[in-house]
Amino acid sequence: MIYLIRHASSGARYDFGRNDFERPLDAHGVLQAEQIKEALHSQPIQKVLSSRAVRCQQSVAPLARHLNLEIEIDPDLFEGSHTAATTLIKKILTAPYDVVACSHGDVIPEILGDLINEGLQIRGGRSCAKGSIWALSFSEDQLLGSYYSSPPAFQ
């Protein structure tokens, strides 16, 4: 299983200018990161990948800590790199364990579009809200389907 996560809520992009990769989670995003941990903490995840963006790393940090795993930064998960990200996700299909990959709102829909063109069946909607999780299932290196879990609403 591959859990493709869009980073949780973060501060306004314009506040960070050229250093947008340093933009952290906001208070709502910190709560969403905890919910991501709660949603996935019992899964047999053995690898946590993230974009270099601080907001992505912070989104999966509670889960990685809980699982006692290091977050591995992968440049193919950063904004604007959807073709490389799709290639990465396809490579992960051969992993004999579950993997988390945290990326961005421009990358994830493109990955899903590429995989849909190759026969991936989508269940649970086609949104990509901040803090959401796509669970991509596979068998013998073939994508079987996916399920979308929207982020919890914190008030």
Image (cartoon, helix red, strand yellow):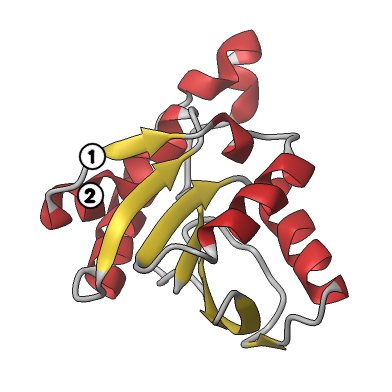
Which quadrant would residue 117 be assigned to in this image? Answer: bottom right
Q: Residue at x 59, y 40 (%)?
A: 77
Secondary structure under tag 2 reads helix
- Quadrant including the N terminus: bottom left
Name the residue tied to disc 1.
Answer: 70
Residue at the far top in the pictured view: 18
Give the crowd class for mark 2: few <14, some 14-19, many >=20 residues within 10 Å: many
Secondary structure under tag 1 reads loop
Q: Residue at x 54, y 66 (%)?
A: 93
Nearer the observer, 75 or 133: 75
Q: Residue at x 53, y 22 (%)?
A: 21
Nearer the observer, 91 or 135: 91
Name the residue tied to disc 2.
Answer: 64
Q: Residue at x 12, y 49 (%)?
A: 68
Residue 76: x %, y % from top left: 62, 36
Residue at the far right in the pictured view: 117
Q: Is residue 26 above or below residue 144?
A: above
In the rendered structure, are the residues bearing label 2 and label 1 in contact, judged by CB atoms less than 8 Å apart?
yes
Residue 144: x %, y % from top left: 63, 87
Residue 14: x %, y % from top left: 65, 21
Q: Amino acid at mark 1?
A: Glu
Asked if residue 130 can be seen in this view, the reply is yes
- Quadrant including the C terminus: bottom left
